[in-house]
Image: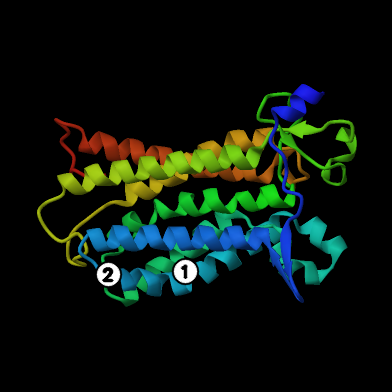
């Protein structure tokens, strides 16, 4: 067992920092850092397109709170039994963890598009500029689960196994010390997805007609970049959910987030297939740039 512990990932000794009467929760700090990183990247990408980066900041002022509310609502709805027994006040205890990314994704994107429309921005290009920041924020935010010692996977003796304190282990695994670090798996997956999205979009912009891509009159269909994101996120979440062992709501005996991943994949894959076929050389259909 000693050799396993030496080659494993330790969990943080604390999930927060006390500053006098103020207690700073690491989970909240990671969420905030993820948001800041996403806004920073989105501002840079929008400015590179010839746009005003302050427009992105104004969008973020509305889209970020909407995303957090949507993420919390998704978690509460899909894990309702836990909140029924814990009491209503637990619904608002976000610092303890519990944000559902699909809900945050939907609410944040809808409000972001609405704000882009109000500012007379090219909504499609705004989405293309912002989308790579979403998996970046998720990757950083997942570190909050590490501090909380939550949402880990099944037992493992691999060198990168995550040490979990006895108080946080499931009852059936009290004698097990190391588990799959699913927070790390998802963080790495999302960082790779962020890089892929940036690479795809760079090629798309280079192939675009010479024009300011921020011009709201410009006909642009970068929606496939959003589809790549939802497909990539769905695929990653699908296999990671299969590894996790934390209690979860089930539908027909299957974790709800697995169903949600399948929905994202089913919605994104056909759209991308049609898009790429139309864009292929020799295609008779209209070209839809990626």
Name which quarter of the figure residue 268 lies in: top left
Q: Is residue 49 left or right of residue 232?
A: left
Instruction: Report the front residue among 39 and 207.
Output: 39
Query: Is residue 258 among what the camera can see?
Result: no
Q: Residue 32 at x, y = what percent? A: 55, 63
The picture places residue 120, in percent across and down from the top left corner, at 27, 74
Rounded to the nearest angstrom, the CA distance separating label 2 from label 1 is: 15 Å
Residue at image coords 65%, 30%: 160
Residue tagged by mark 2? 121
Q: Is residue 192 above or below residue 30?
A: above
The residue carrying mark 1 is 63
What is the total number of numbered labels drawn onto the structure image?
2
Q: Residue 260's quadrant in the figure?
A: top right
**SS label for mark 1:** helix
Closer to the camera in the image, 17 or 261: 17
Q: Quadrant of the C terminus?
A: top left
The N terminus lies in quadrant: top right
């Amino acid at each position: 067992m000693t050799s396993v512990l030496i080659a494993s990932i330790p969990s943080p000794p604390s999930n927060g920092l006390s500053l006098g009467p103020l207690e700073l929760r690491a989970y909240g700090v990671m969420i905030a850092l993820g948001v800041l990183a996403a806004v920073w990247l989105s501002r840079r990408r929008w400015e590179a397109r010839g746009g005003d980066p302050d427009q992105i900041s104004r969008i973020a002022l509305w889209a970020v709170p909407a995303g957090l509310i949507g993420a919390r609502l998704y978690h509460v709805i899909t894990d309702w039994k836990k909140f029924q027994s814990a009491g209503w006040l637990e619904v608002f205890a976000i610092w303890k963890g519990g944000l559902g990314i699909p809900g945050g994704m939907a609410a944040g994107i809808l409000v972001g598009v609405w704000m882009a429309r109000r500012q007379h921005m090219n909504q499609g290009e705004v989405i293309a500029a912002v989308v790579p920041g979403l998996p970046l924020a998720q990757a950083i935010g997942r570190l909050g689960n590490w501090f909380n010692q939550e949402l880990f996977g099944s037992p493992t003796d691999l060198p990168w196994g995550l040490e979990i304190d006895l108080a946080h282990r499931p009852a059936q695994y009290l004698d097990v010390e190391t588990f799959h670090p699913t927070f790390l798996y998802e963080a790495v997956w999302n960082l790779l997805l962020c890089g892929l999205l940036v690479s795809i979009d760079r090629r798309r912009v280079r192939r675009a007609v010479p024009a300011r891509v921020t011009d709201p009159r410009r006909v642009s269909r970068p929606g496939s970049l959003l589809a790549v994101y939802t497909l990539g996120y769905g695929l990653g979440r699908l296999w990671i959910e299969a590894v996790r062992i934390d209690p979860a709501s089930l539908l027909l005996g299957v974790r709800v987030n697995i169903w949600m991943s399948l929905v994202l994949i089913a919605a994104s894959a056909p759209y991308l297939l049609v898009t790429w076929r139309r864009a292929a050389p020799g295609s008779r259909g209209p070209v839809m740039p990626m």
